[in-house]
Amino acid sequence: MKMYDIHMHIIPGVDDGSWDMDMSKTLLYMSYEQGIRKIIATPHSSAFVECGNQEVETLFLQLKEMAVNYLPDLEIYFGCEIRCGNQVIDEILTSLKEHRIPALNNTRYVLAEFSTSVESEEVIKCTERLSEEGWVPVLAHVERYGELFRNDSCIEELQRNGCMFQINTYSVFDEENENIKANAIQLVKEKRVTFLGSDAHRTIFRPPSVKYGLQYLYEHFEKEYIDQIAFGNAATLLGMV
């Protein structure tokens, strides 16, 4: 089993993820042991405001250099998890256009997150705006947005509008909230998931945890589909195919 992780807070000291380079090194090793071979570093968009673009990019390059020397067959790419909402969507679109916040690996794919209590109409409206401007919305940990699952047509409408879905791998097995777990499994059953992520933050809070989730997915679903969401689709995003 292997996985390409499109969602990890691995750049040290810029958000609520890794505290320092030593912790990032430990997180990389923990990820590698569980089969992760490529990672998109996705600090919260607030990091680019609070720390500045140059500082975030400098720390990313230092992290990348460390990884090359430490785990040469593990590659790290640059990205961002962008907090979206009706009140900030105009600012987000401007920041993306002016390269003040990055999309995933310098593509048109945008990893978008919302408040877990967000109304479905707000998600639909914001992702429509992203799509209209030529971006591809990738909803981060979509299984957490409970309102999206209260209306059967909402998930379908989002996909018709070009949205892709990322779920956290641990959600299908290790997640304690049964509703979130059920949402994640439902999305896999319906083959609506595009990408997997760890959403790893720190060694003592939400550490990389994908091993048992991957095992569960491969044991319960079609291998060809799980290959696609575990690494195949991410390989396309990363320009490998």
Image (spheres, helix red, strand yellow):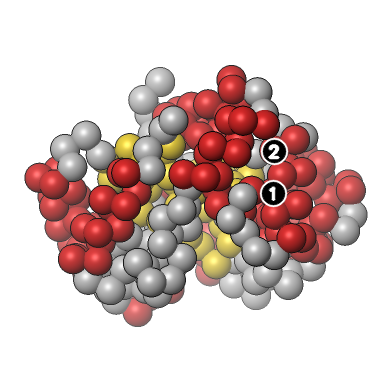
* Image position of 217 (left or right of 74): right
- Residue at (22%, 34%) from the top-left corner? 73
Residue 57 visible here: no
Q: Nearer the viewer, residue 218 or 84?
A: 218
Give coordinates of residue 32: x percent, y percent: 31, 44
Q: Nearer the viewer, residue 118 or 219?
A: 219
Quadrant of image for the N terminus: top left
**Three-letter code for the amino acid on which mark 1 is drawn:** Ala
* Image position of 32 (left or right of 132): left
Tell me, for residue 184, which label it has, or none: 1
Mark 1 element type: helix
Residue 190 visible here: yes
* Numbered disc total: 2
10 Å crowding of disc 2: few (<14), some (14-19), many (20+): some
- Residue at (59%, 22%) from the top-left corner? 223
- Residue at (89%, 54%) from the top-left corner? 151
Q: Are marks 1 and 2 in contact (CB under 8 Å)?
A: yes
**Three-letter code for the amino acid on which mark 2 is drawn:** Val
Give coordinates of residue 159: x percent, y percent: 73, 40
* Image position of 136 (left or right of 153): left
Give coordinates of residue 21: x percent, y percent: 19, 65
Q: Quadrant of residue 37?
A: top left
Quadrant of image for the C terminus: top left
Q: Nearer the viewer, residue 124 or 183?
A: 183
Tell me, for residue 188, which label it has, or none: 2
Mark 2 element type: helix
In the rendered image of this protein, does residue 224 appear above or below residue 37? above
